[in-house]
Image: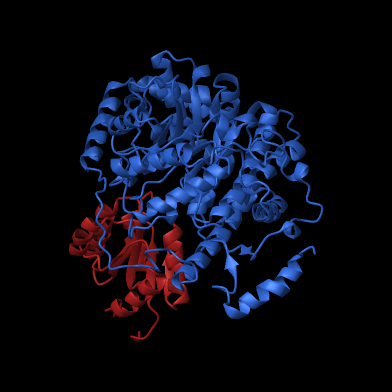
Amino acid sequence: MTADRKLRLLVGKVGLDGHDRGAKIIARAFRDAGFEVIYTGLHQTPEMVVATAIQEDVDAVSLSILSGAHNYLFPRVIELLKERGASDIAVFGGGIIPDEDLAGLKAAGVLAIFTPGTSTEDVVAWVRANVAPRTLG
Amino acid sequence: MKRTRSSWERDTLAAALRKAPERDVAFTTVSDLPIERLYTSDDLEPGWDESEKLGYPGEFPYTRGIHPTMHRGRLWTMRQFAGFGSAADTNERFRYLLEHGQTGLSTAFDLPTLMGRDSDDAMARGEVGKEGVAVDTLEDMEILFGGIPLDQVSTSMTINAPAAVVFCMYLAVAERQGVPFAKLSGTLQNDILKEYIAQKEWIYPPRPSMRIITDLMAFCAREVPLWNTISISGYHIREAGSTAVQELAFTLADGIAYVEAGRAAGLDVDAFAPRLSYFFNSHNDFFEEIAKLRAGRRIWAHVMRDRFGAKNPRSWMMRFHTQTAGCSLTAQQPLNNVARVTIQALAAVLGGTQSLHTDSFDEALALPSQEAVTVALRTQQVIAEESGVTNTIDPLGGSYFVEALTDRVERDAMAYIEKIDEMGGMIAAIERGFPQKEIADASYHYQRQVDRGEKTIVGVNKHAVGETRRVDILKIDDEVERAQLARLAAVRARRDNAKLTRDLDALRRAAESGENLIPPMLACVRDYGSVQEISQALVPVFGTYREVSVL
């Protein structure tokens, strides 16, 4: 697989949170930017998201969380990726995340959190700069 | 000499435009409806007839308002939505709001409750008490409404998929307080169709969900006559990114589906239609919102009288609650949200709302703090008691612009409603993903406009400053989840589980036989069955729902 292949990104909604406006917008913006997008649909468990990520060979997992459960869900996904030997899959996300939780999420391994008001262009630019196609070994 | 529009354009406007062009080549609403430079009587439809289009307040087609005196007679109900943490925390917030002049309660439930899941379900991890109050069994409702006499408040409960279960819990609390059902007043959101369209909190597929709703309508028509059985909600449709026209059209199409379901279940339209109410969003585009609300009243009046043959004028009236647009609030420069909320609240009032929730300025950051909630309520009080806008009825009626825009919104909404009728009604349209796709398209279109700076969000894509977000926000302690799990376990250990099993069996049999589900559901609730246990008892008969995701 060549390094200049298209990036494959998973856009996920975990937990019971049904607010999918942001997830759908970012999924379309990624698609329009030329990435391959796998959208999980709603009400996924962390286990389901991780299984999909591995099965689909994605380069990054992005989660949209507006329920307040981010401090549980992000670390849980990262932990499960690690357990499955896939910790090279980048994890980032967005949603309504209070400032004081950002440091903890970063420490848990979340590469970036985009909060309301971020333009889709900025997120796309960040992905281009920070997510590389994985070399599958 | 009589001045005409064309002579004005020739003699006065042209020179001004040569000297200084307008700020933009085209002006549009936030939903992208085109707005003209000037509106005159020429912009009203040929033959525009005031008596047909507007009528008088309290009379068909209610364009100017459903009451003869509107806000001169009685102000709208100031109803702030609240619910967080434990039932005891929310009970305390309720009593605080009642002491500060709020006139109705409005309950927010947490996500697990909204999805019909108990606090100890695996999917509930991390979400218990986060976005609203956790209710598992009757015991939680007893705490939630403790010390609040249910015959003296009107209570709105924002819950949909398990609405009937939670409503039964409210009835059981009333029984324990010795309050007769006939004295209960309030509103159950209970609008499952917009869940499939926008908010995405469901348990069963659409068709069996409609059965529960018609059972509830029949039960309330008999036993709880003052209760508003469905609050047909455009709010979430708008929050999901729809335009104003889509919000109105899809919501009215949902309303039409409920009326059709009620009639198909053998109910007389005038027996239940007076207890249907609406719930709309009020967004930033001031006149578009007012036009939407005025157009909505007119469409509903015609639909109910002419399409469904309702005889009771109360069936023709579109009564509604309004909430300001959470999705318009910004995390950046959060105090700017006070200005947004004021404009939106004013639009709701001028649009003739019956009740109003004003959002708190910190809502883009987290759940509202006490200070922010108070400012939001005070905003309504300033509009009501200082601004003077309540001194006359429908003050914008007869404005060429507002009437032309009202007519435009009505026409565009009717085009959607007709399209949905052609698909076989809203349930069929939902099954095809039609409203979901229209909203996703509108939402992406708007986001692109914001990204390109074609639509302005002050403090975000214009007038932004290096950001420091510093407001005190409310955080829900994880302790809430732990305490809730302990309480639920204690209830499960204490109750008569054998009796509950028989109740749940009886409920399932009622689902199979077609008898009204509410009485057997009430029996389950009285014996402390949980929201999830009662909801799941119906799954073998009704099935579950999985969305086909449309991007």
> Does B353 appear above or below B88?
below
Residue A137 as seen in the image, left or right of residue B173: left
Residue at the far top: name it.
B178
Question: In this view of the protein, can residue B387 be seen by the observer?
Answer: yes
- Picture residue at 48% right of the left edge, 70% below the top: B448
Q: In the image as oriented, which residue stretches furthest toward the right?
A: B47
Residue A43 shows up from this direction: no
Towards the viewer: B351 or B212: B351
Which sits in the foreground, B211 or B385?
B385
Q: Residue at x 60, y 46 (%)?
A: B293
Q: How is the image coloured?
A: by chain
Q: Residue at x 51, y 42 (%)?
A: B322
Residue B325 or B400: which is nearer the viewer? B400
Q: Residue at x 56, y 44 (%)?
A: B350
Judged left or right of residue B389, residue A56 is left
Identity of the residue furthest to the front in this view: B1
Quarter of the image for residue A118 reads: bottom left
Q: Is residue A52 above or below residue B341?
A: below
Q: Image quadrant for the N terminus of chain B?
A: bottom right
The image shows residue B151 at horizontal and vertical percentages of 45, 19
- Chain B: colour as depicted: blue
Chain A shade in the render: red
Q: Nearer the viewer, residue B19 or B389?
A: B19
On screen, residue A89 versus residue B279, left or right, reads left
- On screen, residue B307 versus residue A41, left or right, reads right
Could you say where residue B132 lies in the image, as x and y percent from the top left?
35, 40
How many marks the image carries: the answer is 0
Image spot of residue B316 (x, y percent) = 68, 35
